[in-house]
């Protein structure tokens, strides 16, 4: 599958590990039951109903028997947790048995996952990203994961690989600070964003990238993770969002979830307060805003 779709084997293995612990935990909820329940009383009824119809189409195609179609409470199925609509679009019968079996056929699992990534824009020969070291005085407001530029431009700004090697030749790359200004920094490119299309979570995509790096014999994260900075609770995040709004830094409707609007509001406040504008919510920040 890796050769056929030009997606590295370690990336496929990392997703497999993240999604089902290498096939050992694929969920035990009947997919039809899960989606029918969500379609009746869930928060995303229209979405769940469309996924239910896709699941019924899979049964109609005889790719799997109903009693074997099991997965998560949200309808994700198989060893790499495909939603039914993605199964219909990307699943592959790699072993030639006439079924696209992402539950029991490892060739089908890997080919289907590779096909998804390939058709979602995976760029062959490009890394997902790399850990980097930021220069003294770096403007942390640039590290929002959205401001993209060639790796050469980041290099001109003083960004360096942690091992001293040249930065990877990424043409459309951004800086991520998953633990704020005190934690590790990463330069991520188009393939990182392709992983996000598989699961739209920055922490998930970063975990896949780092696990794939370890599986390939690469280095672990070099910078220290700030373990003395605990994440805020949901009630604390609600209080932070409310306080930011009160002070005129619009974070949207307070919901206790950190999204782009909240991070942008945090950065604007940090800039006015003379703090590193990393957009990272901390207890110290909450106390300052309040």
Image (spheres, rainbow, N blue to C red):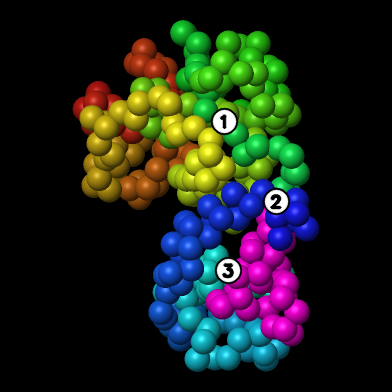
- Crowding around mark 2 (Cα neighbors within 10 Å: few <14, some 14 to 19, many 20+) is many
**Dividing the picture into quarters, in which one does residue 160 lie?**
top right
Residue bounds of the magenta highlight: 90-119
Q: State yes or no: discs 2 and 3 in contact (Cβ < 8 Å).
A: no
Q: CA distance from mark 1 to mark 2?
A: 17 Å
The image shows residue 87, relative to residue 140, as above or below, that is below
Does the magenta segment cover residue 203? no
Q: Say which label, 1 or 2, has the lower sequence index.
A: 2
Eye-nearest disc, 2 or 3: 2
- Crowding around mark 1 (Cα neighbors within 10 Å: few <14, some 14 to 19, many 20+) is many
- Which element carries disc 2, helix, strand or loop? loop
Residue drawn where x is 47% and y is 76% of the image: 71
Q: Say which label, 2 or 3, has the lower sequence index.
A: 2
| Disc sitting over residue 130 in the figure | 1
Q: Which residue is mark 3?
A: 82
Q: Which residue is mark 2?
A: 7
Residue extending furthest toward the right: 4
The image shows residue 235, relative to residue 244, as above or below, that is below
Eye-nearest disc, 1 or 3: 1
Numbered circles on residues, count: 3
**Dividing the picture into quarters, in which one does residue 57 lie?**
bottom right
Q: Say which label, 1 or 3, has the lower sequence index.
A: 3
- Which element carries disc 1, helix, strand or loop? strand
Between 67 and 50, which is closer to the camera in this rendering? Answer: 67
The image shows residue 211, relative to residue 93, as above or below, that is above
């Amino acid at each position: 599958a890796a050769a056929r779709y030009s997606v590295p084997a370690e990336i496929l293995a990392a997703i497999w590990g993240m999604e089902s612990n290498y096939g050992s935990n694929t969920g035990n909820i009947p997919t039809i039951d899960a989606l029918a329940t969500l379609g009746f009383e869930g928060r995303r009824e229209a979405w769940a109903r469309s996924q239910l119809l896709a699941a019924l189409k899979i049964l109609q195609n005889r790719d799997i028997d109903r009693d074997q179609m099991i997965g998560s409470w949200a309808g994700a199925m198989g060893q790499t947790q495909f939603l039914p609509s993605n199964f219909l679009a990307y699943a592959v019968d790699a072993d030639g048995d006439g079924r696209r079996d992402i539950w029991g056929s490892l060739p089908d699992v890997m080919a289907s996952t590779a096909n998804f990534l390939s058709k979602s824009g995976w760029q062959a020969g490009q890394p997902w990203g790399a850990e980097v070291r930021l220069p003294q005085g770096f403007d942390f407001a640039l590290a929002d994961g959205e401001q993209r530029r060639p790796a050469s431009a980041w290099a001109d700004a003083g960004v360096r690989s942690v091992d001293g090697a040249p930065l990877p030749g990424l043409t459309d790359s951004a800086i991520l600070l998953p633990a704020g200004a005190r934690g590790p920094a990463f330069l991520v490119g188009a393939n990182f964003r392709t992983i996000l299309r598989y699961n739209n979570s920055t922490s998930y995509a970063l975990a896949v990238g780092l696990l794939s790096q370890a599986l390939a014999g690469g280095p672990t994260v070099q910078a220290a993770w700030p373990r003395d900075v605990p994440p805020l609770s949901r009630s604390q995040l609600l209080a932070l969002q409310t306080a930011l709004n009160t002070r005129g830094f619009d974070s949207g409707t307070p919901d206790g979830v950190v999204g782009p609007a909240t991070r942008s509001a945090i950065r604007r406040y940090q800039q006015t307060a003379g703090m590193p504008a990393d957009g990272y919510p901390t207890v110290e920040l909450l106390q300052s805003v309040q």
